[in-house]
Amino acid sequence: MRERSLGAEVQQSLTPGQQIVKIVNEELIAILGGEPSRLVASSQPPSVVMLVGLQGSGKTTTAAKLANHLKRSGQRPLLVAADNRRPAAIEQLVTLGRELDIPVYHESTSVPSEEVCAHALAQARSLAASWVIVDTAGRLHIDEEMMAELARVKKALKPDEILLVVDAMTGQDAVRSAEEFHSRVNLTGLILTKLDGDARGGAALSIRWVSGVPIKFIGTGEKLDALEPFYPDRLASRILGMGDILTFIERAQATLDEQQAKALQKKVQTATFDLEDFLSQLRAIKKMGPVAALGDAARGLAAGQPIARGNRGEAAEKGGGDHPLHDP
């Protein structure tokens, strides 16, 4: 970054401040992986995702969110409650599965986790499930007993993906957890939770840099649809305080009906827009998420913000155009 900032690239720029922010943005994107990383599916279904992590990271809820994400994309997921150390976690997953109308396989807490997983695979084949998402045992801290159990579960499942669920608010503790889990079970990806809070992505930068494991999803809220695929360029924008326009647009497209929007536009133009229409608009906005989060995502739309062309491959593909950059 220093070499690029002191080079001719900046010296010849008409707006050096914007150019430096552009360089920082591009370097952040490169550190975070450059391109989005997707789940790897098995050539012979069902594909298996094994979720690991410490207690309090949101692992059980994330399992349900991931299953919901796959279901909405046309897949047939099966959830597996393999945390036989915590009966409450099994009950929680069963409740979430019922709410999402997704089957959950579980057994008595006296059955070893690896046997539960073996039986779950047979159940998945009988249900013609395309994905199996396994919620494994967690602890308050990493210990040898937990790691040994995870190794046995991994041997029974032969998973296509081993994803570590980490709390983005825990900072360097998350980095140490990622290192330890990766050295013992060979992680294939990460899911960062609680990125809707004050954490802008410092943990994501550190974990990605130290472990080299790609980030595949981020949790952006408590609702069961608050799980998003990870885009390095979008998180880089959040870290720099430049908003996340593409995510904002995707939320709007998923929530607002195009035909209804055209009908409302016509009502506004003909002065027939009433309070009932206004109420329907407020309800639609509410479905998109907290207003504060929407405001952060749409920050790049702020009037008068300087514009500079950046390295935004994802934005270019989707018609995002120029990328807003702050002038420091």
Image (cartoon, rainbow, N blue to C red):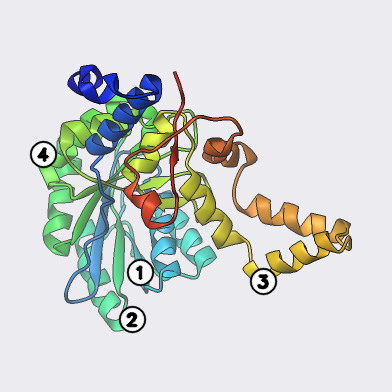
Q: Nearer the viewer, residue 103 or 22?
A: 22
Which one is in front in this view, the residue at disc 2 or the one at disc 4? 4
Could you tell me how far apart the alpha carbons at marks 4 and 3 are, in whole angstroms? 52 Å
On-image quarter of the C terminus: top left
Few, some or many C-alpha atoms within 10 Å of disc 4 (few <14, some 14-19, many ≥20)? few
Sequence-first disc among 1 and 2: 1
Q: Amino acid at mark 2?
A: Leu
Distance, label 3 to label 1, CA atoms, is: 34 Å
On residue 127, the disc is 2
Circle 4 sits on which residue? 183
Q: The N terminus appears in which quarter of the rendering?
A: top left
Q: From mark 1 to mark 2, how far is it between C-alphas?
A: 9 Å
Q: Mark 3: which secondary structure?
A: helix
**CA–CA distance between discs 2 and 4?**
34 Å
Identify the mark nearer the N-term, 3 or 1. 1
Type of residue at label 1?
Answer: Leu
Query: Please, is residue 265 above or below residue 316 in the view?
Result: below
Does residue 44 lie above or below 207 as drawn? below
Label 3, label 2: how many angstroms apart (C-alpha)? 37 Å
Identify residue type, mark 3. Answer: Gln
